[in-house]
Amino acid sequence: LFRSRGSFLIIAFAILCAAGMIFFAATGLFRSGKGRQPASRANVLVEEDLNGDTIPDVIREFTWNWVPLYHSEDRNFDSMIDHTWIWQKGKPAYRDIDLNYDGRIDERMVYDPEGQPFYIDTRPGAAGPVLVRKVFRDGILWKMLEDQDADSYFDHLTEYDDKAEAVRE
């Protein structure tokens, strides 16, 4: 009689454990966080005031899962954006810089689909022809074209090797 009672307790304990596992699996306690929907799919905006004047000096925007979209900076604290980066699909697409801090973009870098620099156009005052174009290959400076008389035609070409040393003009 004692032996059969012990077997009964073991079987009852096994059934109880199996029922508990089924209950926990059904309620989602073992599910990973990847399958869950976030509370909000709105973009996340982060603003930082670095000098204490209550005007944001750094503004960053991310998707709901923290993939970067936008980053801008006011580096000289004059309340105008000086540097801007734009991302597409998590990789940089282009970067704009105000070189002389006059509020107008003077230089734009365009990135290739892998996120490597493709070319940089320098156009002071954000108007007129491109005065300097730097072309990159695999993220390394390859050619620099210059329009020295601002007539919309490049007058000077410099080619570089893989160590960024000038090899031909």
Image: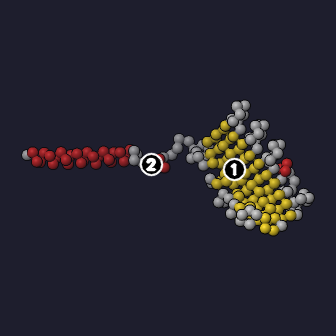
Q: Residue at x 47, y 49 (%)?
A: 35
Q: Which residue is mark 1?
A: 86
Residue 32: assigned label? 2
Mark 1 residue element = strand
Total marks shown come to: 2
Q: Earlier in the sequence, mark 2 or mark 1?
A: 2
* Closer to the camera in the image, 9 or 73: 73
Position of 140 relative to 1 (above/below):
below
Residue 169, x across and y down, in percent: 83, 67
Q: Which quarter of the figure has residue 113?
A: bottom right
Q: Which quarter of the figure has residue 109?
A: bottom right
Q: Residue at x 68, y 45 (%)?
A: 71
Residue 107, x across and y down, in percent: 79, 52
Q: Tell me, what colour scheme is on the image?
A: secondary structure
Position of 53 relative to 61 (above/below):
above
Residue 137, x across and y down, in percent: 71, 64
Q: Residue at x 71, y 38 (%)?
A: 57
In space, the residues marked 2 and 1 are separated at their CA atoms by 32 Å
Q: Amino acid at mark 2?
A: Ser
Mark 2 residue element = loop
Residue 76 shown left or right of residue 41 in the figure: right
* Closer to the camera in the image, 161 or 95: 161
Q: Residue at x 85, y 60 (%)?
A: 146
> Counting other residues with Cα less than 10 Å from the Cα at mark 2, is it few (<14), some (14-19), or many (20 or more)?
few
* Closer to the camera in the image, 134 or 113: 134
Q: Which quarter of the figure has residue 29?
A: top left
Position of 112 relative to 126 (above/below):
below
Residue 25, x across and y down, in percent: 36, 48
> Counting other residues with Cα less than 10 Å from the Cα at mark 1, is it few (<14), some (14-19), or many (20 or more)?
some
Question: Quick check: marks 2 and 1 in contact, CB under 8 Å?
Answer: no
